Amino acid sequence: MNSTWSRFNISSIVLGFAFLYLPIVLLIVFSFNESKLVTVWGGFSTKWYVSLFHNQGLMDATWVTARVGVISATVATVLGTLAAITLTRYTRFRGRVLFSGMVFAPLVMPEVITGLSLLLLFVAVGLDRGFVTVTLAHITFTMCFVAVVVQSRLVSFDRSLEEAAMDLGAPPVKTFFQITLPVILPAIISGWMLAFTLSLDDLVIASFTSGPGATTLPMKIYSQVRLGVTPEINAACTILIAVVAIGVIIASIANKRREVQRQLDEQAAQRG
Amino acid sequence: MKSLGSIRRDFAPWNDPNAKPYIQFDRVTKKFGDFIAVNNLSLTIFEREFFALLGASGCGKSTLLRMLAGFEEPSAGRILLDGQDLRGIPPYKRPVNMMFQSYALFPHMTVEKNIAFGLKQEGMPGADIEKRVAEMLKLVKLEQFAKRKPHQLSGGQRQRVALARSVAKRPKVLLLDEPLGALDKKLREETQFELMDLQQELGLTFVVVTHDQEEAMTMADRIAIMDKGEVMQVATPAEIYEAPTSRFVAHFVGNVNMFEGKVAERTASTTRITGATGAQIVVDNGGAAAAGSDIIFAIRPEKIKVSSKKPADAVNALEGEVYDVAYLGDMTVYHIKLDDGQIVRASALNASRITEDPLTWNDRAWVSFRPDAGVVLTR
């Protein structure tokens, strides 16, 4: 492979990263803007962060988003894991292909359609739109993502582990909780985190299915932006970016460490 | 005190008509859809026996083992263990344990916890579990690895953990699925003997599945050769090798020369065979072959002597030409092309360092063998 830093390579990288990150950098920079005008730099200040925490509307929306995220991600993880287990284990029932297609269809379904159909359903059954309906909607669309993540782990899961546990005297339920679950737990956790993140930044489906008193953070930000971007919103977004970035960094460092440790262990084991 | 070897020599319950069978496969058939994995198979295994199921992959040997463990139910027939019909008993209630080919060690548990797993399911008190685990670790010489996780062990150590875990519950029968398949050659040979010692020490019945004939020959008291879901022959390693009852078995175990022919004459003590290409062969024992019937005469390469002149006293001597010579150090393998066109494989032990009269390519040569050196096969 050619690894020289040609002029072409450098400009490709600069352009590519600029395209990806310039908007975000701009947003972060302007969140520390003294001026009330978003596009005019008026000196460094953190006052928007302070005022952010006094903005009751934004704080309420953050709280709603967090609750919706945790509850929907948890329920979606349970349902998605069950779906993944059924689809990988019981491979011989009738209509399995149809079922797996139906579980994974929401992955490619346009959000507008998911949102609209859920709205129609909630209206039809007379469920008042609010916290419950947003949460239900988020469970619906994040479940398939969990199922995909968990299923990919289950496919490579060595079934003889379960057979060994049963052979040693553990009934099926005990085998599941003592062997299967601990082994696939990392995939379940990533599934949960994916579902939580998806719920966190969903705007379209939440707009369709939410009601008064259950405004999520993306909805709140979007509606405020329509009245004009304030540096407060910039600050809120910067915090959001920071939270996500820290999460990703911690996860990848932990992963890397585990990997390195594993390699060291294996080398040590080979040496005897 | 008797050595383990002599105990093994005296151990032959299969020759005792009063011996009680321990494991019985009674006309067992197993189908997967249209595929017949095991076909109307009957087999008897005795207590404390080291029994090997030997066959190529797909012959049904693993299915047989999995039915004994309870992971598969027979489509027809019964499996009895110590007189008890195993039908409907789930794997977690059977008094058999299995050592898996992949070892199936629980990756999230330490070596200790892996070994203790089965004991915990039994509800054994904590102090007893600790004692038993320590005993098992000592048995497989892994005391200092108790706190390690499986991925921190080498292949050979993992194999020993798997073994310790499967014998920790003192099962009546231990099933081993290709127990040495994942080890390298040297380690495999050492471990074969360890397994045999362990089986004697614990007094367990071992049923081992393998595709490696050397492994089966070394370890087992008796071997069942399987093909296409059926048992071709059940016998001791020596009988399997020296007295195969079919072409398949003769061919499957070791190297063999086969002569096609007809029984020309049969008397009480000798059978004269005319080969398809004219060779005349006289053998002691014609088995079940009647005069005039088509048979196969099978003879192992090491039972054939190669010489440059016709041996004076040989009953069976055939002339040909040296077609190929392979010097392997401990022995030399000759391929002799007989004058009738058949190629015969003969191996000679290199007992002395210098051979007078060495045979080489294109030399004229004679192959000779005693009348009791081979077997006559009718199928």
Image (spheres, coloured by chain):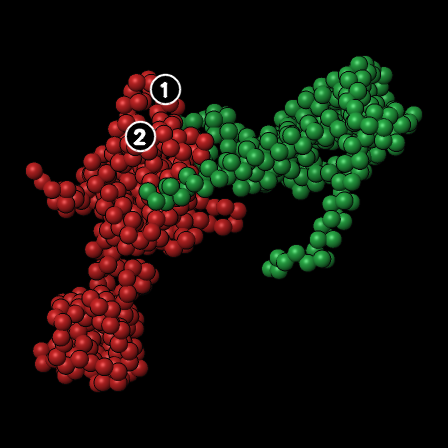
* Letter of the chain shown green in the rendering: A
What is chain B's hue in the picture? red
Q: Quadrant of residue A106?
A: top right
Q: Residue at x 28, y 40 (%)?
A: B206
Q: Judge from the rendering whether residue A246 lies leftward or rightward of residue B356; answer left or right.
A: right
Task: Please name the amino acid that badge 1 sits on.
Answer: Gly
Give the residue pinned by disc 2. B168
Image coordinates of residue A248 in percent, x first then y, are 64, 33
The number of callouts visible is 2
Please identify the quarter of the rendering in which residue A97 is found: top right
Crowd band around label 1 with a 10 angstrom C-alpha radius: few (<14), some (14–19), many (20+): few
Q: Residue at x 15, y 67 (%)?
A: B372
Element type where label 2 sits in the image: loop
Q: Are marks 2 and 1 in contact (CB under 8 Å)?
A: no
Q: Could one spot residue A216 in this view of the protein?
A: no
Residue topped by disc 1: B123
Three-letter code for the amino acid on which mark 2 is drawn: Ala
Q: Is residue B309 left or right of residue B163?
A: left
- Which tag, 2 or 1, sits closer to the chain's start? 1
